[in-house]
Image (cartoon, rainbow, N blue to C red):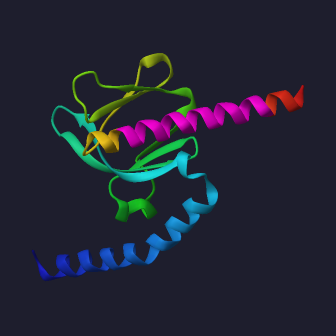
Amino acid sequence: MRRGARKNACVGTRLLARIQPVVDLYFSQSRPAASRMQGTLCKWTNYMSGWQQRWVVLDGSTLAYYLAATEVHQGCRGSFKVTSCDIHVHPTDHLRFDIVMPGGRQVLYLKASSTVERQQWVVALGTSKQEEEGNIGKCNATTL
């Protein structure tokens, strides 16, 4: 590794260490723990590149993914509302779960590093959907 590249990697690590408490504070105050989660998952990209690690953030009903945790400031690579999606666990791959967009034409294939982590993500996504659907119902009931 070149010296400049090593120096940049160290700067990125120090920057992440500085901003992580702020990110944690934001997430702890903005959402209940059940509808908030973040971590590294593998995302299926295509047959040429296969599975690629991505930093994934669930904040309320929004799921966003980034190239890496250190690149959150550059913006997400994709995001969507999970309330309109279906979550499927894979029947044979115990690390994988799929998020199916409305109409089934687009699917986000994700893999966790363990079955426990997969279960945590599936529960958090399901809870997020339920919370958001409950909030929508409350809004509709009060506006009638």
Q: Which residues are magenta?
A: 119-138
Q: Is residue 83 above or below residue 70?
A: above
- Quarter-of-image position of residue 68: bottom left
Q: Is residue 55 above or below residue 136?
A: below
Q: Is residue 144 above or below residue 120?
A: above
**Left or right, 115 with reference to 79:** left
Residue 124 in the magenta stretch? The answer is yes
At which x and y percent is residue 122?
A: 42, 36
Residue 135 in the magenta stretch? The answer is yes
The residue that appears at 57% across and 33% down in the rendered structure is: 129
The residue that appears at 80% across and 34% down in the rendered structure is: 139
Q: Is residue 70 above or below residue 50?
A: below
Task: Point out the residue furthest to the front here.
Answer: 116
At which x and y percent is residue 72?
A: 42, 60
The residue that appears at 22% across and 23% down in the rendered structure is: 92
At which x and y percent is residue 132?
A: 64, 36
Task: Point out the residue furthest to the left here.
Answer: 1
At which x and y percent is residue 84?
A: 56, 27
Viewer-proximal residue, 77 or 60? Answer: 60
Question: In which quadrant of the rendered image does the C terminus lie?
Answer: top right
Question: In which quadrant of the rendered image does the N terminus lie?
Answer: bottom left
**Left or right, 99 with reference to 25:** left
